[in-house]
Image (tube, rainbow, N blue to C red):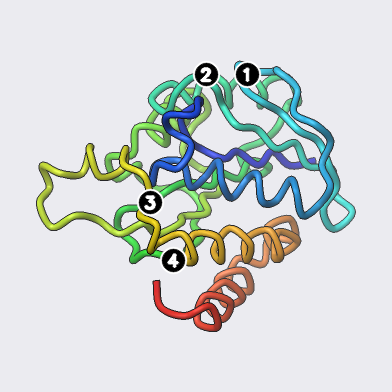
Amino acid sequence: MLLFVGLGNPGRAYARNRHNIGFMAAEAIAARHAFGPPRARFQGAAREGTIAGERVILLKPQTYMNESGRSVGEAARFYRLSLGEIVVLHDELDLDPGKCRVKVGGGDAGHNGLRSISAHIGADYKRVRLGIGRPADKALVHPYVLSDFANSEEPWVAALCSAIADNAALIVTGDDAGLQNKIHLAMEAAGPA
């Protein structure tokens, strides 16, 4: 069994924010793989399904980004999951828009959702980092991540979420290099971000 966690902030006001691309990718996975309806559990919205023969719980914490670890920690304890069974999908300022990189462990690079999760369960979980780019001025980072994607960005956002959903089996089987390659090829075919 695996726990997939999409990071974001709950509520309509945040739905299209750059910070919510983890929620968007999680929803694309749930739709593509016919997961069950969301249920209020673990201070979040949890859905269950099967990908590549593996049971997957998909969790969208409803605690707001800075407290994501409360929700993830509760789910991890309930299912008695090891860190190797937890995958977090999140926005990444240090990657160009539309890029995807996978890593296990490491720091939080100023991402408050990751900081909260690491404080609650430890840092050695898998991260699927979804590039949103960063503003040139460091002072603009906070308003940037909490602003909506521009209409001109919607095509690459949709293409990235779709590619993640199409290739979610590679996340399940642990083929991180294969996932990154498939996403790269899909985004190249979709056109410039």
Relative to 22, is 44 on the left or the right? right
**Residue that mark 2 sits on:** 70
Nearest to N terminus: mark 2 or mark 3: 2
* Whether residue 125 can be seen here: no
Q: Where residue 48 appears, x then y in whole percent? A: 81, 36
Packing grade of label 4 (10 A; few <14, some 14-19, many >=20) is: many
Considering the numbered disc 1 on the image, is that residue within a helix, a strand or a loop? helix
Instruction: Name the residue at 57% across, 21% down.
Output: 71
Residue 74 circle label: 1
Instruction: Name the residue at 68% across, 42% down.
Output: 85
Q: CA distance from mark 2 to mark 4?
A: 29 Å
Q: What amino acid does circle 2 point to?
A: Arg
Packing grade of label 1 (10 A; few <14, some 14-19, many >=20) is: some
Packing grade of label 3 (10 A; few <14, some 14-19, many >=20) is: some
Q: CA distance from mark 1 to mark 3?
A: 31 Å
* Closer mark to the observer between disc 2 and disc 3: 3
Quadrant occupied by the C terminus:
bottom left
**Residue that mark 3 sits on:** 149
* Whether residue 82 can be seen here: yes
Q: What amino acid does circle 4 point to?
A: Gly
Relative to 98, is 177 on the left or the right? right
Height in image: 190 above or below 115? below
Instruction: Name the residue at 63% across, 45% down.
Output: 26
Relative to 119, is 187 on the left or the right? right
Image quadrant assignment for residue 87? top right
Considering the numbered disc 4 on the image, is that residue within a helix, a strand or a loop? loop
Residue 98 circle label: 4
Q: Are marks 2 and 1 in contact (CB under 8 Å)?
A: yes
